Amino acid sequence: MSKIIVTGGAGFIGCNLAMALNARGEDDILIVDDLNHPLKKAHLERIRHSGYLDKRELRPALRAGKFADCKAVFHLGACSSTTEMDEEYLADNNTAYTRELAEWCMAGGRRFVYASSASTYGAGERGYSDDHSVIPSLRPLNPYGRSKQAFDMIALENGWLDSIVGLKFFNVFGPYEDHKGPMRSVIHKAYGEIGATGKLRLFKSYRPEYADGGQLRDFVYVRDVVEEILWFAGNPGKNGIYNCGTGKARSWMDLGRAVFAAMGREERIEFIEMPETLRGHYQYFTEADMSKARAAGFAHEFTTLEDAAADYVRNYMDKGLC
Protein backbone atom coordinates (compact mmCIF):
# COMPACT_ATOMS: atom_id res chain seq x y z
CA MET A 1 0.00 0.00 0.00
CA SER A 2 1.63 3.21 -1.19
CA LYS A 3 2.13 6.08 1.23
CA ILE A 4 2.39 8.74 -1.50
CA ILE A 5 0.35 9.02 -4.72
CA VAL A 6 1.66 11.10 -7.63
CA THR A 7 -0.80 11.52 -10.48
CA GLY A 8 0.82 12.42 -13.78
CA GLY A 9 3.88 10.75 -12.26
CA ALA A 10 5.27 9.54 -15.58
CA GLY A 11 4.76 12.97 -17.12
CA PHE A 12 6.86 16.09 -17.02
CA ILE A 13 6.50 17.74 -13.60
CA GLY A 14 5.34 14.51 -11.98
CA CYS A 15 8.42 12.58 -13.09
CA ASN A 16 10.72 15.29 -11.73
CA LEU A 17 8.78 15.37 -8.47
CA ALA A 18 8.90 11.59 -8.04
CA MET A 19 12.66 11.55 -8.61
CA ALA A 20 13.07 14.34 -6.05
CA LEU A 21 11.05 12.27 -3.57
CA ASN A 22 13.37 9.34 -4.30
CA ALA A 23 16.34 11.59 -3.54
CA ARG A 24 14.76 12.30 -0.15
CA GLY A 25 14.45 8.59 0.60
CA GLU A 26 10.81 8.17 -0.46
CA ASP A 27 10.32 5.02 -2.54
CA ASP A 28 6.81 4.02 -1.45
CA ILE A 29 5.15 5.93 -4.28
CA LEU A 30 2.18 4.98 -6.42
CA ILE A 31 2.58 6.45 -9.90
CA VAL A 32 -0.73 7.19 -11.62
CA ASP A 33 -0.70 8.10 -15.31
CA ASP A 34 -1.35 6.72 -18.75
CA LEU A 35 1.51 5.21 -20.73
CA ASN A 36 0.17 6.07 -24.17
CA HIS A 37 3.55 7.49 -25.18
CA PRO A 38 6.74 5.35 -25.20
CA LEU A 39 8.74 8.16 -23.65
CA LYS A 40 6.50 8.06 -20.59
CA LYS A 41 7.50 4.43 -20.13
CA ALA A 42 11.13 5.54 -20.15
CA HIS A 43 10.32 8.20 -17.55
CA LEU A 44 8.63 5.62 -15.33
CA GLU A 45 11.74 3.45 -15.43
CA ARG A 46 13.76 6.31 -13.93
CA ILE A 47 11.61 6.35 -10.79
CA ARG A 48 11.84 4.05 -7.77
CA HIS A 49 8.20 3.35 -7.01
CA SER A 50 6.05 0.76 -5.27
CA GLY A 51 3.36 0.56 -7.93
CA TYR A 52 1.82 1.93 -11.11
CA LEU A 53 -1.88 2.46 -11.85
CA ASP A 54 -3.57 3.67 -15.00
CA LYS A 55 -5.32 6.99 -14.39
CA ARG A 56 -8.71 5.47 -15.25
CA GLU A 57 -8.36 2.96 -12.40
CA LEU A 58 -7.58 5.35 -9.54
CA ARG A 59 -11.03 6.74 -8.80
CA PRO A 60 -12.71 3.29 -8.73
CA ALA A 61 -9.89 2.05 -6.49
CA LEU A 62 -10.40 4.87 -4.01
CA ARG A 63 -14.16 4.26 -3.96
CA ALA A 64 -13.41 0.61 -3.19
CA GLY A 65 -11.42 1.59 -0.12
CA LYS A 66 -7.94 0.97 -1.47
CA PHE A 67 -4.84 3.01 -0.53
CA ALA A 68 -6.28 3.85 2.89
CA ASP A 69 -2.77 4.25 4.33
CA CYS A 70 -1.82 6.96 1.82
CA LYS A 71 -0.48 10.05 3.58
CA ALA A 72 -0.21 12.50 0.65
CA VAL A 73 -1.45 13.00 -2.89
CA PHE A 74 0.35 15.18 -5.42
CA HIS A 75 -2.20 15.67 -8.17
CA LEU A 76 -0.30 16.79 -11.26
CA GLY A 77 -2.13 14.72 -13.85
CA ALA A 78 -4.40 16.55 -16.29
CA CYS A 79 -5.00 17.23 -19.93
CA SER A 80 -2.78 20.30 -20.23
CA SER A 81 -3.35 21.00 -23.91
CA THR A 82 -4.42 24.60 -24.43
CA THR A 83 -5.89 23.57 -27.80
CA GLU A 84 -8.22 20.88 -26.40
CA MET A 85 -11.78 21.94 -27.21
CA ASP A 86 -13.77 19.05 -25.66
CA GLU A 87 -15.09 20.84 -22.59
CA GLU A 88 -17.07 17.82 -21.38
CA TYR A 89 -13.88 15.76 -21.34
CA LEU A 90 -11.97 18.52 -19.53
CA ALA A 91 -14.78 18.91 -17.00
CA ASP A 92 -14.37 15.27 -16.00
CA ASN A 93 -10.63 14.72 -16.50
CA ASN A 94 -9.44 18.00 -15.01
CA THR A 95 -12.19 19.33 -12.75
CA ALA A 96 -14.22 16.36 -11.44
CA TYR A 97 -11.13 14.16 -11.06
CA THR A 98 -9.46 16.84 -8.92
CA ARG A 99 -12.60 17.30 -6.84
CA GLU A 100 -12.86 13.60 -6.06
CA LEU A 101 -9.22 13.34 -5.03
CA ALA A 102 -9.49 16.48 -2.88
CA GLU A 103 -12.57 15.19 -1.07
CA TRP A 104 -10.91 11.79 -0.49
CA CYS A 105 -7.80 13.42 0.93
CA MET A 106 -9.69 15.79 3.21
CA ALA A 107 -11.90 12.97 4.50
CA GLY A 108 -8.82 10.93 5.43
CA GLY A 109 -6.64 13.74 6.75
CA ARG A 110 -4.18 13.40 3.87
CA ARG A 111 -2.03 16.18 2.45
CA PHE A 112 -3.33 17.29 -0.96
CA VAL A 113 -1.28 19.45 -3.32
CA TYR A 114 -2.72 19.99 -6.80
CA ALA A 115 -1.75 21.71 -10.00
CA SER A 116 -3.78 24.76 -10.83
CA SER A 117 -2.43 26.87 -13.69
CA ALA A 118 -1.36 30.39 -14.59
CA SER A 119 -3.67 29.97 -17.59
CA THR A 120 -6.51 30.86 -15.20
CA TYR A 121 -5.26 34.48 -15.34
CA GLY A 122 -6.35 34.76 -18.97
CA ALA A 123 -4.90 37.80 -20.70
CA GLY A 124 -3.71 39.18 -17.36
CA GLU A 125 -6.12 42.10 -17.39
CA ARG A 126 -6.77 41.49 -13.69
CA GLY A 127 -3.11 41.04 -12.88
CA TYR A 128 -1.34 37.97 -11.51
CA SER A 129 -2.17 38.13 -7.83
CA ASP A 130 -2.91 34.80 -6.13
CA ASP A 131 -5.08 36.45 -3.49
CA HIS A 132 -8.24 34.37 -3.11
CA SER A 133 -10.45 37.42 -3.56
CA VAL A 134 -9.27 37.68 -7.17
CA ILE A 135 -10.25 34.14 -8.20
CA PRO A 136 -13.93 34.81 -9.09
CA SER A 137 -12.98 37.67 -11.42
CA LEU A 138 -10.53 35.68 -13.58
CA ARG A 139 -11.41 34.95 -17.20
CA PRO A 140 -9.26 32.17 -18.76
CA LEU A 141 -8.77 32.29 -22.52
CA ASN A 142 -9.29 28.61 -23.34
CA PRO A 143 -11.20 25.50 -22.16
CA TYR A 144 -8.12 24.11 -20.37
CA GLY A 145 -7.80 27.27 -18.30
CA ARG A 146 -11.53 27.23 -17.57
CA SER A 147 -11.33 23.62 -16.34
CA LYS A 148 -8.59 24.62 -13.88
CA GLN A 149 -10.48 27.75 -12.82
CA ALA A 150 -13.59 25.64 -12.23
CA PHE A 151 -11.90 23.57 -9.54
CA ASP A 152 -10.27 26.61 -7.95
CA MET A 153 -13.77 28.06 -7.61
CA ILE A 154 -15.14 24.82 -6.14
CA ALA A 155 -12.34 24.82 -3.56
CA LEU A 156 -12.91 28.49 -2.77
CA GLU A 157 -16.69 28.26 -2.43
CA ASN A 158 -16.52 25.15 -0.22
CA GLY A 159 -13.86 26.50 2.12
CA TRP A 160 -11.38 23.80 1.10
CA LEU A 161 -8.52 26.26 0.60
CA ASP A 162 -8.04 26.22 4.36
CA SER A 163 -6.96 22.56 4.06
CA ILE A 164 -5.36 22.00 0.63
CA VAL A 165 -2.77 23.64 -1.63
CA GLY A 166 -3.12 24.62 -5.29
CA LEU A 167 -0.12 25.89 -7.23
CA LYS A 168 -0.47 28.05 -10.32
CA PHE A 169 2.41 26.99 -12.56
CA PHE A 170 3.71 29.57 -14.99
CA ASN A 171 5.90 28.67 -18.04
CA VAL A 172 7.62 25.55 -16.76
CA PHE A 173 10.51 23.97 -18.69
CA GLY A 174 13.12 21.33 -18.03
CA PRO A 175 14.07 17.66 -18.30
CA TYR A 176 11.60 14.93 -19.26
CA GLU A 177 9.11 17.05 -21.18
CA ASP A 178 9.99 15.34 -24.47
CA HIS A 179 6.68 13.44 -24.69
CA LYS A 180 4.58 16.63 -24.68
CA GLY A 181 4.80 17.24 -28.42
CA PRO A 182 3.49 20.71 -29.39
CA MET A 183 2.90 21.54 -25.70
CA ARG A 184 6.57 21.17 -24.74
CA SER A 185 8.49 24.32 -23.84
CA VAL A 186 9.94 26.73 -26.38
CA ILE A 187 13.40 25.98 -24.96
CA HIS A 188 12.97 22.34 -25.94
CA LYS A 189 11.67 23.32 -29.38
CA ALA A 190 14.45 25.91 -29.82
CA TYR A 191 17.16 23.35 -29.10
CA GLY A 192 15.88 21.11 -31.89
CA GLU A 193 15.33 23.97 -34.33
CA ILE A 194 18.75 25.52 -33.75
CA GLY A 195 20.42 22.14 -34.01
CA ALA A 196 18.69 21.39 -37.31
CA THR A 197 18.75 24.81 -39.01
CA GLY A 198 21.19 26.99 -37.06
CA LYS A 199 18.46 29.56 -36.40
CA LEU A 200 15.40 30.19 -34.22
CA ARG A 201 12.07 31.59 -35.38
CA LEU A 202 9.92 33.62 -33.01
CA PHE A 203 6.50 35.20 -33.47
CA LYS A 204 6.23 38.83 -34.44
CA SER A 205 4.49 41.20 -32.07
CA TYR A 206 1.14 42.75 -32.98
CA ARG A 207 1.10 45.28 -30.16
CA PRO A 208 3.20 48.44 -30.54
CA GLU A 209 4.36 48.45 -26.92
CA TYR A 210 6.15 45.12 -27.47
CA ALA A 211 8.97 44.72 -29.98
CA ASP A 212 9.21 41.52 -32.00
CA GLY A 213 10.52 38.94 -29.55
CA GLY A 214 9.87 41.35 -26.69
CA GLN A 215 6.75 39.56 -25.47
CA LEU A 216 7.29 38.57 -21.83
CA ARG A 217 6.79 35.36 -19.88
CA ASP A 218 7.65 34.04 -16.45
CA PHE A 219 9.88 31.09 -17.39
CA VAL A 220 10.47 28.77 -14.42
CA TYR A 221 12.78 25.74 -14.24
CA VAL A 222 11.09 22.50 -13.24
CA ARG A 223 13.58 21.93 -10.41
CA ASP A 224 12.37 25.13 -8.77
CA VAL A 225 8.74 24.08 -9.26
CA VAL A 226 9.48 20.82 -7.44
CA GLU A 227 11.08 22.76 -4.58
CA GLU A 228 7.88 24.77 -4.11
CA ILE A 229 5.66 21.69 -4.29
CA LEU A 230 7.71 19.91 -1.64
CA TRP A 231 7.92 22.97 0.59
CA PHE A 232 4.16 23.28 0.77
CA ALA A 233 3.77 19.52 1.21
CA GLY A 234 6.05 19.73 4.23
CA ASN A 235 4.26 22.72 5.77
CA PRO A 236 0.70 21.55 6.44
CA GLY A 237 -0.18 24.81 8.16
CA LYS A 238 0.27 26.69 4.88
CA ASN A 239 -2.75 26.24 2.63
CA GLY A 240 -4.54 27.95 -0.23
CA ILE A 241 -3.69 28.85 -3.81
CA TYR A 242 -0.20 30.15 -4.55
CA ASN A 243 1.69 31.20 -7.65
CA CYS A 244 4.66 29.15 -8.82
CA GLY A 245 6.98 31.25 -10.98
CA THR A 246 10.19 33.23 -10.67
CA GLY A 247 8.41 36.57 -10.29
CA LYS A 248 10.64 37.99 -13.04
CA ALA A 249 9.25 38.22 -16.57
CA ARG A 250 11.76 37.64 -19.36
CA SER A 251 11.41 38.09 -23.12
CA TRP A 252 11.41 35.47 -25.84
CA MET A 253 14.60 37.13 -27.09
CA ASP A 254 16.19 36.51 -23.69
CA LEU A 255 15.17 32.89 -23.91
CA GLY A 256 16.51 32.50 -27.45
CA ARG A 257 19.84 34.07 -26.54
CA ALA A 258 20.15 31.81 -23.49
CA VAL A 259 19.68 28.71 -25.64
CA PHE A 260 22.16 29.86 -28.30
CA ALA A 261 24.71 30.60 -25.56
CA ALA A 262 24.15 27.24 -23.87
CA MET A 263 24.64 25.47 -27.20
CA GLY A 264 27.71 27.54 -28.06
CA ARG A 265 26.12 28.63 -31.33
CA GLU A 266 26.05 31.99 -33.10
CA GLU A 267 22.78 33.83 -32.52
CA ARG A 268 20.40 33.82 -35.52
CA ILE A 269 16.81 34.81 -34.73
CA GLU A 270 14.09 35.43 -37.30
CA PHE A 271 10.53 36.66 -36.79
CA ILE A 272 7.51 35.01 -38.38
CA GLU A 273 3.81 35.80 -38.59
CA MET A 274 1.64 34.51 -35.78
CA PRO A 275 -1.26 32.31 -36.94
CA GLU A 276 -4.53 34.24 -37.09
CA THR A 277 -6.14 31.72 -34.72
CA LEU A 278 -3.68 32.66 -31.95
CA ARG A 279 -3.63 36.44 -32.22
CA GLY A 280 -6.80 37.05 -30.22
CA HIS A 281 -5.75 34.67 -27.44
CA TYR A 282 -2.07 35.46 -27.10
CA GLN A 283 -0.56 36.50 -23.76
CA TYR A 284 1.98 39.31 -24.16
CA PHE A 285 2.97 39.40 -20.50
CA THR A 286 2.92 36.99 -17.58
CA GLU A 287 4.71 37.39 -14.27
CA ALA A 288 3.96 35.56 -11.05
CA ASP A 289 3.30 37.71 -8.01
CA MET A 290 5.30 35.67 -5.48
CA SER A 291 4.70 37.91 -2.47
CA LYS A 292 2.10 35.59 -0.93
CA ALA A 293 4.36 32.51 -1.15
CA ARG A 294 7.27 34.52 0.25
CA ALA A 295 5.14 35.76 3.13
CA ALA A 296 4.17 32.14 3.85
CA GLY A 297 7.87 31.34 4.30
CA PHE A 298 8.91 29.90 0.94
CA ALA A 299 12.39 31.41 0.59
CA HIS A 300 13.89 29.28 -2.21
CA GLU A 301 15.97 31.25 -4.73
CA PHE A 302 14.85 30.54 -8.29
CA THR A 303 17.37 29.63 -10.98
CA THR A 304 18.04 32.36 -13.54
CA LEU A 305 16.87 31.74 -17.10
CA GLU A 306 20.49 31.67 -18.33
CA ASP A 307 21.66 29.16 -15.69
CA ALA A 308 18.59 26.99 -16.14
CA ALA A 309 18.97 26.92 -19.93
CA ALA A 310 22.65 26.00 -19.59
CA ASP A 311 21.88 23.15 -17.20
CA TYR A 312 19.01 21.84 -19.31
CA VAL A 313 20.95 21.99 -22.58
CA ARG A 314 24.31 20.66 -21.40
CA ASN A 315 23.29 18.12 -18.79
CA TYR A 316 20.11 16.80 -20.39
CA MET A 317 19.38 17.64 -24.02
CA ASP A 318 22.99 17.27 -25.19
CA LYS A 319 22.93 13.83 -23.54
CA GLY A 320 19.57 12.83 -25.03
CA LEU A 321 17.79 13.23 -21.67
CA CYS A 322 15.04 15.71 -22.46
Image (cartoon, rainbow, N blue to C red):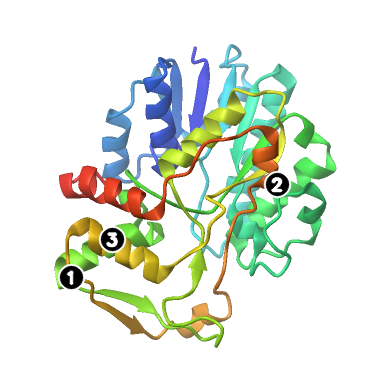
| Residue 22 coordinates in the image, percent (x, y) | 38, 21
- Left or right: 288, with 261 as reference point: right
Which residue: 49% across, 12% down? 1
Disc 2 marks a residue whose amino acid type is Phe
Closer to the N terminus: mark 2 or mark 3? 2
Q: Distance between the residues labelled 2 and 3?
A: 36 Å
Near-viewer residue (184 or 267): 267
Quadrant position of residue 126: bottom right
In the structure shown, which secondary structural element does the residue marked by tag 3 occupy? helix
The nearer-to-camera label among 2 and 1 is: 1
Near-viewer residue (98 or 157): 157
| Residue 294 coordinates in the image, percent (x, y) | 65, 39
Q: Name the residue under label 2.
A: 151
Which residue: 43% across, 16% down? 26
Near-viewer residue (277 or 312): 312
Quadrant position of residue 229: top right
In the structure shown, which secondary structural element does the residue marked by tag 1 occupy? loop
Q: How far apart are marks 2 and 1 (CA)?
A: 45 Å
Closer to the N terminus: mark 3 or mark 1? 3
Closer to the N terminus: mark 2 or mark 1? 2
Q: In this view, does 252 lie above or below 56?
A: below
- Look at the numbered discs 2 and 3 and tell me whether their residues touch, using CB distance below 8 Å: no
Q: Distance between the residues labelled 3 and 1?
A: 10 Å
- Look at the numbered discs 2 and 1 and tell me whether their residues touch, using CB distance below 8 Å: no
Q: Can residue 170 be seen in this view?
A: yes
In the structure shown, which secondary structural element does the residue marked by tag 2 occupy? helix
Mark number for residue 259?
A: 3
Which residue: 36% across, 76% down? 202
Q: Name the residue under label 1.
A: 266
| Residue 78 coordinates in the image, percent (x, y) | 52, 46
